[in-house]
Image (spheres, helix red, strand yellow):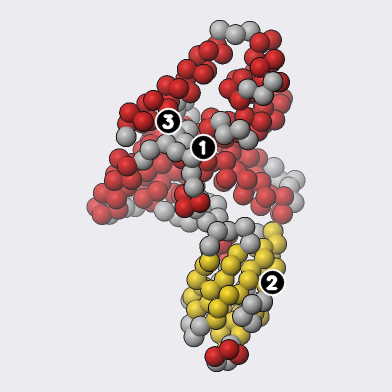
């Protein structure tokens, strides 16, 4: 497994090394022609347009740019107080997408951000095992910098203090089995706001049951837009049972089971 990581990391480092000897003019010409490695390198030199260049490379699947773009968007969502709630929510959703893509492909910045998000339960469900995994992988990475490497180790250590022996063993197993890859849908965590969709009550019986979800009344088959974290989310009620409801959430893969919220 480690050989896979080393091979991919040296491939990325090789692309950067090839650009190191090139002039700014050559890098700019290559970036304008669509070369993602050149676009990534240019982002470092063109700070005023860094996000533009990182985005161009990220959209071509360049992992380092995905990590940098995700990190910048996440930071902006936290510090730009002039954003409207819906715009902030959209920015955070996009940040999470790029961070997940980068982390699963072995990018240290993506892994460092993913570790911290999992530790704090920010944007994703709080998960100490995943926080340990991403923090450890980041600290082992050949492409970590002075920020991401130490952050990965500190997040891993913070997670350890909250874990039991079984959780630590599971985290170690996940680290050992990790291979950098293009993530599939099963790798994508549900955004944290999904947990804010709650079932508050069920009335009636059989085919005449009604469900109250986030203060909205649903019959089977109803679709209603719920306001969550400043964004409008369409929720479709698929099935109403005696004590649970099955729903589909717009933009989220698969179905979700809602159980009666605790009072």
In depth, the one of 108 and 181 nearer the eye is: 181
Q: Residue at x 53, y 32 (%)?
A: 63
- Residue 153: give x, y in percent of width and height: 38, 36
User: Which of the two marks, 3 or 2, is nearer to us in this view?
Assistant: 2
Q: Does the residue at mark 2 contact the one at mark 1 (Cβ under 8 Å)?
A: no
Which residue occupies the extreme bottom position in the image? 205
Q: Residue at x 40, y 48 (%)?
A: 130
Task: Give the class, few, some or many, for how many residues have Cα within 10 Å of label 3's Cα (few <14, many ≥20).
Answer: many
Secondary structure under the numbered disc 3 in the rendered image? helix
| Rendered position, 207 above or below 171 | below
Q: Which residue is mark 2?
A: 224
Task: Give the class, few, some or many, for how many residues have Cα within 10 Å of label 2's Cα (few <14, many ≥20).
Answer: some
Q: How many marks?
A: 3
Looking at marks 3 and 1 on the same chain, the residue that comes earlier in the sequence is marked by: 1
Q: CA distance from mark 2 to mark 1?
A: 34 Å
Query: Quick check: 167 left or right of 72?
Result: left
Query: Quick check: 260 left or right of 166?
Result: right
Q: Which residue is mark 3?
A: 149
Looking at marks 2 and 1 on the same chain, the residue that comes earlier in the sequence is marked by: 1
Q: Which residue is mark 1?
A: 102
Q: Residue at x 75, y 51 (%)?
A: 84
Q: Residue at x 49, y 47 (%)?
A: 184
From where the camera sits, is residue 234 visible? yes
From where the camera sits, is residue 154 visible? no
Secondary structure under the numbered disc 1 in the rendered image? helix
- Residue 139: give x, y in percent of width and height: 38, 32
């Amino acid at each position: 497994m480690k050989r896979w990581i080393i091979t991919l990391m040296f491939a990325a480092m090789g692309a950067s090394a090839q650009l190191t000897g090139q002039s700014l003019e050559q890098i700019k010409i290559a970036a304008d022609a669509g070369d993602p490695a050149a676009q990534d390198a240019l982002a470092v030199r063109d700070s005023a347009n860094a996000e533009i260049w990182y985005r161009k490379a990220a959209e071509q699947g360049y992992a380092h740019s995905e990590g940098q773009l995700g990190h910048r968007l996440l930071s902006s969502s936290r510090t730009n107080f002039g954003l409207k709630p819906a715009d902030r929510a959209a920015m955070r959703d996009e940040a999470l997408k790029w961070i997940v893509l980068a982390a699963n492909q072995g990018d240290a910045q993506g892994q460092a951000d993913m570790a911290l998000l999992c530790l704090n339960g920010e944007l994703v469900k709080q998960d100490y095992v995943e926080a340990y995994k991403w923090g450890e992988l980041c600290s082992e990475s050949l492409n970590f910098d002075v920020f991401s490497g130490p952050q990965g180790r500190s997040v891993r250590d913070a997670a350890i203090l909250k874990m039991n022996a079984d959780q630590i063993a599971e985290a170690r197993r996940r680290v050992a089995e990790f291979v950098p890859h293009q993530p599939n849908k099963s790798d994508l965590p549900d955004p944290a706001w999904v947990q804010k969709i709650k079932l508050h009550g069920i009335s009636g019986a059989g085919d005449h049951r009604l469900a109250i979800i986030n203060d909205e009344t649903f019959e089977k088959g109803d679709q209603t837009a719920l306001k969550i974290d400043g964004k409008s989310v369409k929720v479709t009620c698929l099935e109403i049972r005696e004590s649970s409801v099955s729903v589909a959430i717009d933009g989220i893969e698969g179905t979700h089971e809602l159980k009666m919220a605790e009072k």
